Image (cartoon, grey):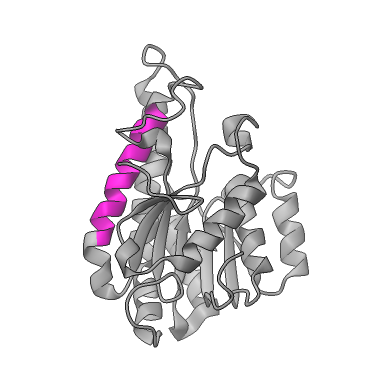
Amino acid sequence: MAKRDFAVHSVLVTGSSSGIGLGLVKQFLKLPTPPQWIFATFHESDEEKNREINNLVSQNSNLVLLYLDVTDRKSIVAAAEEVQKYVGECGLTLLMNNAGILINATLQEETAKNMAAEYAINTIGPLQVSQVFLPLLEMAAERSPQQGLSCSKAAIINTCSSAGSLELVAFFDVGEMVGYRCSKAALSMLTRCQSLEYPDYGILCACIHPGYVKTNLTEWQGEQSVEQSTRGIIKVLSTLSEEDNGSFLDWEGHRVPW
């Protein structure tokens, strides 16, 4: 369980209609002190795909569903404007850049088109979303009475992967996933860059490896269930402090080699 004093005023999770994103939304709703506002995002108008998140929205008055395409800056700006209407001067406490795609291609099969698509969503998407939501994160940090850095004050958490670790190159026997690995390695560098600049605004930045999770992204292969992974992630978030800024951790809180 997360620390009992873990309290986040508001959180936005990209890619929330399924998989890890949906699991994170569920875990935030289960907290002893749930966020006043949870913003879940989707980018496909598919009733079947969005059925579960829509059901959660109907049952929880603090859960708001927003359209957000991380590759479209106008869409991101529109989502930020909606979030602003709910949070007002309190700002956005926690941004979780979770949306991602995986195309399992070998070195010989990889194409520029596939690689560009993975970079657009997995790397450039988190960059753009963080840029647009920065003023709301700054606002949350300025209003927080907490000293130092934490996810309860203001934070950006990027969903990375040990598959993008230059040292580990994890799960290569499962799939080469060349474009995916490169995009996640680039996301790790983006996180490091954010961690050097955004703490000046009171914002903690880190990346999380959720594990090899059984989702549609991994074609339901994996070592952890969505619930195991997301429950662990929430616990890790509840413990992050200034010394964790710029770190790469897994869902159990262990350091992942870059």
Residue 16 seen in this snapshot: no
Instruction: From the viewer's side, name the closer residue of 26 and 49.
Output: 26
Could you tell whether 243 is left or right of 228 in the image?
A: left
Asked if the magenta segment contains residue 65, the reply would be no
Image quarter of the N terminus: bottom right
Q: Main secondary structure of the magenta part?
A: helix
Total residue callouts: 0
Locate residue 251, reporting x and y percent: 51, 50
At a point 59% along the width and 68% down the height, the residue shown is 38
Please indicate whether residue 39 sits to the left or right of residue 128 in the image.
Answer: right
Magenta segment: 179-195
Q: Give coordinates of residue 129: x percent, y percent.
A: 40, 57
Tell me the quarter of the image containing the C terminus: top left
Residue 175 appears in the rendering = yes
Toward which corner of the image does residue 241 lie, by quadrant?
A: bottom left
From the viewer's perspective, is 258 left or right of 75?
left
